[in-house]
Amino acid sequence: MKMTNLKLTASAWALMATTALAGNDAITLGMVLEPPNLDPTGGAAAAIDEVVYANIFEGLTRFGPDGAVLPALASDWSISEDGLIYTFTLRDGVTFHDGTTMDAEDVVFSLDRARAEDSTNAQKALFAGIESVTAVSPTSVAVKLSAPNGNFPFNMAWGDAVIVAPESVETAATAPVGTGPFTFVEWAKGDHVTMARNDAYWGDAPALAKATFKFISDPNAAFAAMMAGDIDAFPNFPAPETLAQFEADPRFNVIVGSTEGETILSTNNAAEHLDDIRVRKAIAHAIDRQAIIDGAMFGYGTPIGTHFAPHNPDYMDLTGNSAYDPELSRQILKDAGKEGITLRLMLPPPAYARRGGEIIAAQLRDVGINTEISNLEWAQWIEQVFKGKDFDLTIVSHTEPADINIYARPDYYFQYDRGEFQELNDILSVTSDPAQRAILLAEMQQIIAEDYVNGYLFQLAKTGVANAKINGLWENAPTQANDLTGVSWSE
């Protein structure tokens, strides 16, 4: 039976938010995209985690600002000699924001829910190797795997693996209840999400009493809001062409780092024309990556030739495999009898997609491929492209960490199906030796590059702008998050 502490009403939370001290106790952050919902266990959009990860929701483990896997709701864990059983020790005295106790039963519920047959979790593969989850005691959970997986604590650090409670999960999409250092206050759709400091938090109390995430998709409006002081920080600033102006202004800090965001020309490998590797190869050689980086990102971004982050020690530079060669593209299309084909290019709202899409359309037109561009809002993109697979080409940054395993899912939205790659991924999932993993990852990177599964463009840079008095914002983005736990204002 779960124990319940005194609960605060919604009106009390709202009062707490409105009476939170301004200035050194409050922060307003800008975000380009509004999340479609606030449940990280039931949605694929990066914007969900950007609001709730480490702020409202927590998992057994978590990512630190350097990408390290750290303890979170689990203070530590042990692994059986055969590598099949992970036993997690839970922190004692943790409560959800509604006052209910967080214990082993909630971990069992969360992991079983994520791996259930009818699960809507966007990263269901993270839980596929779980055979059973057992509550050993209120503060101890044993997870039995079907095969050894040295990467399991890493998997549990994803936003998709946060711990939720059966009492509140049904409203998580609109009124999330977690265990984190901030509690949900309100969501004014189309405008902002507000959260307040959780005074009952089990860990160190955050310096901030209130945080507001303001949604501003237009680059010009984002610039104006920063200059006017309406926004205190914009961790992923959408107008990189203005960064030099901020750098010259002592009121601001420009924060440039790296992300896990492989920005790709996603390709529907099951669509007409695109199920032919010759067409995909022609597209790859028609792309001038540097022109896209310069034109869409104003020089910020690192060219990539496969789906892997350049800052990862196992990265292979395969850009030469798809080097810009429009004459080769024209010849390939001619030999394949595919000259003059028309493809649908669906573009979500981010500037890298809208600006980059126009540049890529011109590059494809130059080699004899026509495009019909459709600008989609984020919710429409999720439904039509990601879920419905009703597209030919699209541009998106895959910001999940170390996610090359998505190419082992034939039903994933770009519908790539190669048994050899799937077998390598299966071997990788049970391999813990770093040298062996590097060999497997190298082969996997080469396979998808040589199959021209997608057009690999660039690694998304993290270009942020913040008030110069703000400390503790992440420079790099090892996961899609705006972690406020260490953010404070200077005196």
Image (tube, grey):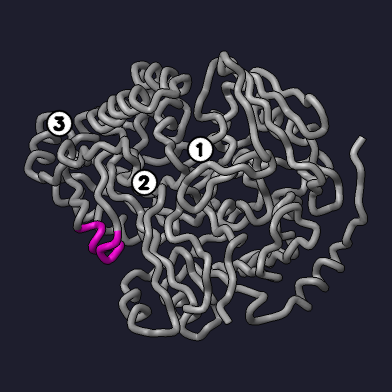
Q: Where the N terminus falls, by quadrant?
A: top right
Secondary structure beneath dot 3 equals loop
Q: Quadrant of residue 43?
A: top right
- For mark 1, what is the residue? 388
Q: Is residue 292 magenta?
A: yes
Q: Which residues are magenta?
A: 291-300
Query: Image point 39% across, 16% down: which residue?
Result: 423
- For mark 2, what is the residue? 262
Nearer the N terminus, badge 1 or badge 3?
Answer: 3
Residue 104: x percent and y percent? 78, 33
Tell me the distance, in whole angstroms, between the alpha carbons under discs 1 and 3. Answer: 29 Å
- Up/down of 363 relative to 118, above or below: below
Nearer the N terminus, badge 1 or badge 2?
Answer: 2
Q: Amino acid at mark 1?
A: Gly
- For mark 3, what is the residue? 337
Q: Is residue 153 magenta?
A: no
Q: What secondary structure characterizes most of the magenta part?
A: helix
